[in-house]
Amino acid sequence: MKNMKLKAILALLLAVAVFMGMAGVSFAAEPDAGVKGLWLRSTNFPDDAEVVEFRDDPFPLDENLSNVSYSRSVDGLLTFEIFRGTIEDSELQEPDDVRDLIEMFVYDDGGDVDDIEIDMNPSVFSAHFTYPCVMAAYATGQNEDTRMNVSLYIFTDVYSFVATVSVAADWFEDYEDRIEEWLIGLEWVE
């Protein structure tokens, strides 16, 4: 009888541990777990990625609105940043604003603006996120400092989101397939 009770207790503890692991207990410890309002969570980016920076700057008059930036790094070669800003206070108020902003960024960082690739209607992403999206691929920097960047812009009613993966140009091919998986693996949370 004691043996059966012990087995039942162990089975219950195992089930609770499995459930807790599946329920995202590890996510609760992430810096972005307390972001208020609509936010993007990365579901398939490596768990062991180093947190480079996390900022959540709430607005004084409405703590539910804030600019949020969360940047992580893998192998020191790649960074993945998710940024959220309010449309009202952003240079990114609509999809047509993306090209000008990227051209300015690339030019200021020594890249070639003629090499920017933009998809104004990436249907897979727009359908997945149910908001207007823009995809952009571009290089920044020069020579050994050249980085390849892939950015997903999402425009909601209140926020503009930018999810950018930036990788050293020499390593881009090694990560290229995973970049799309990481971006399509983003999920809305509130």
Image (spheres, rainbow, N blue to C red):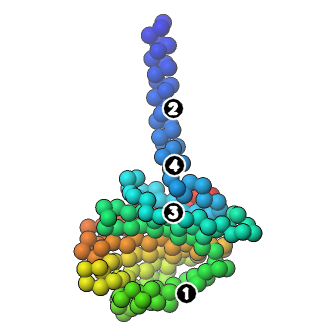
Q: Residues within 10 Å of mark 3 (few under 14, many from 20)?
A: some
Q: Earlier in the sequence, mark 4 or mark 3?
A: 4
> Which amino acid, mark 4?
Ala
Q: From this view, report whether residue 51 is shown above or below residue 136.
A: above
Q: Secondary structure at mark 2?
A: helix
> Which amino acid, mark 2?
Val
State the CA–CA distance, disc 4 to disc 1: 35 Å
Give me the residue at 60% from left, 73% from top: 85
> Are the residues at dot 1 and dot 2 in contact (C-beta closer than 8 Å)?
no
> Which amino acid, mark 1?
Asp
Nearer to the camera, 130 or 179: 179
Residue 34, numbered label = none
Q: Earlier in the sequence, mark 2 or mark 3?
A: 2
Q: Earlier in the sequence, mark 1 or mark 2?
A: 2
Residue 29, numbered label = 4
Q: Which tag is nearer the camera, tag 1 or tag 3? A: 3
Q: From this view, report whether residue 106 is shown above or below residue 87.
A: below
Q: Secondary structure at mark 3?
A: strand
Residue at the spot of label 1? 97
> Are the residues at dot 2 and dot 4 in contact (C-beta closer than 8 Å)?
no
Q: Earlier in the sequence, mark 2 or mark 4?
A: 2
Residue 71 horizontal side relative to residue 147, left or right: right
Give me the residue at 46% from left, 35% from top: 18
State the CA–CA distance, disc 2 to disc 4: 18 Å
Residue at the spot of label 2? 16
Nearer to the camera, 127 or 181: 181
